[in-house]
Image: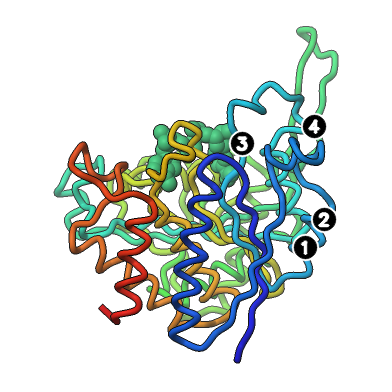
Amino acid sequence: MKTYNIALLKGDGIGPEIVDSAVRVLECVGKKLNIKFNFTPYLIGGIAIDETGKPLPEETVEGCLASDSVLLGAVGGPKWDTLPGNIRPEKALLGIRSAMGLFTNLRPAKLYPALKGECPLREDIVANGFDIMIVRELTGGIYFGERGYREGKYGEEAYDTESYSRMEIERIARVAYETARKRNKKLISIDKANVLETSRLWRKIVHELASEYPDVEVADMLVDNAAMQLVRNPSQFDVIVTSNMFGDILSDEASQITGSIGMLPSASLSDNTRGLYEPIHGSAPDIAGQNKANPIATILSGAMMMLYSFNEVEASDLIVNAVDKVLEKGYRTADLAHGAPALTTSEITDKIIEAIANND
Ligand code: NAD
């Protein structure tokens, strides 16, 4: 029997509830397809600060590096908001990404036919739906550049710098070309090459690689235009590749136009098969512990793990199809029910498990 060891980082707020849902779904899939999952929980975020004084204990890093892949809930909450920056729960996210060498972030933004009404854009704009995959560089650029405070011409000033090496751009561009190959073979590289040197190098290297992927159509777009095009005509995008900060902002915009952050998974990948899979939303402290959270983003993160870490295509398809079926039947958690009777976290998980078990 195939066995995968999965580290669970449940974290804070709704993290434990939604990770437990994903675990139940994976166990059901495992039973059906004869795959064994060993789940081992580790501390991260606020709960790790409470129990060990650190947002990312060494044991957690070691456990993740010893696992085949990692499933994360979310970290943070008001309890830890006043702590200094270096021991804030969110610090653990940068730390684990860097320890695992996760230089790629895949963020799908898909408008589900059953959830078209959630989209804040005009009906005619999204008549054809959209299904975008954002490939974001995750360990370079301005979030990791030299920074500090100094005395400037006008007194105290702060600075952050962005640099990108050829190696960093090449490896993320290759992931993007490969991803485009598996989809509709359309890649848009987003930069600010009219202003930034890093963007000019980015653009040059993306085009140098194009000859190795003649089947993929590649084009450039400036980031300000991209922000506009995402709300003007989102269906023009298939795969997007961009830098860390632009990807951070554009992927949030893309998720917003799907209208449902509780539905969106993400994958962070390294140059080996071990990845970190997590919903794009935060720890939702306002509904934590109430069995109200939508677990689908985390369940779909589990499906992405099956596909991108383990190449278990059937397992991934089973989960994705079950989610589609449950939505088509009209089942909703409170975030999507608009005041109508809603299912709890555990009830919608049961429905998804039922759909998988019955081959619905
Ligand atoms: P959030 O995503 O946690 O919540 C925003 C709103 O969306 C809230 O009203 C929440 O109830 C709702 N929501 C989010 N996920 C939901 C789900 N699965 N089902 C139903 N409703 C859901 O963002 P926030 O309120 O800005 O942040 C709360 C905490 O989460 C903060 O401490 C923040 O730092 C942290 N955070 C963590 C991550 C992460 O762990 N990756 C990401 C973003 C924010």
In front of the other: 158 or 166: 158
> Mark 4 to mark 3: distance in Å?
24 Å
With respect to residue 104, does 13 lie above or below? above
User: For mark 3, does the 10 Å Cα neighbourhood hold few (<14), some (14 to 19), or many (20 or more) residues?
Assistant: many
Residue 80 percent location from the top left of the image: 67, 28
- Say which residue appears at 61% left-offset and 51% top-offset: 10
Residue 147: mark in rendering: 4
Residue 256 percent location from the top left of the image: 37, 42
Residue 76: mark in rendering: 3
Q: Name the image quarter holding the N terminus.
A: bottom right
> Mark 3 to mark 2: distance in Å?
19 Å
> Mark 4 to mark 1: distance in Å?
31 Å
Residue 59: mark in rendering: 2
Residue 167's image quarter?
Answer: bottom right
Residue 54: mark in rendering: none
- Say which residue appears at 74% left-offset and 63% top-offset: 64
Mark 2 C-beta to ligand 1 under 8 Å: no
Q: Is residue 85 left or right of residue 215?
A: right
Residue 195's image quarter?
Answer: top right
Chain-order first, disc 3 or disc 2: 2
Task: Identify the secondary structure beneath mark 2.
Answer: helix
Q: Are marks 1 and 2 in contact (CB under 8 Å)?
A: yes
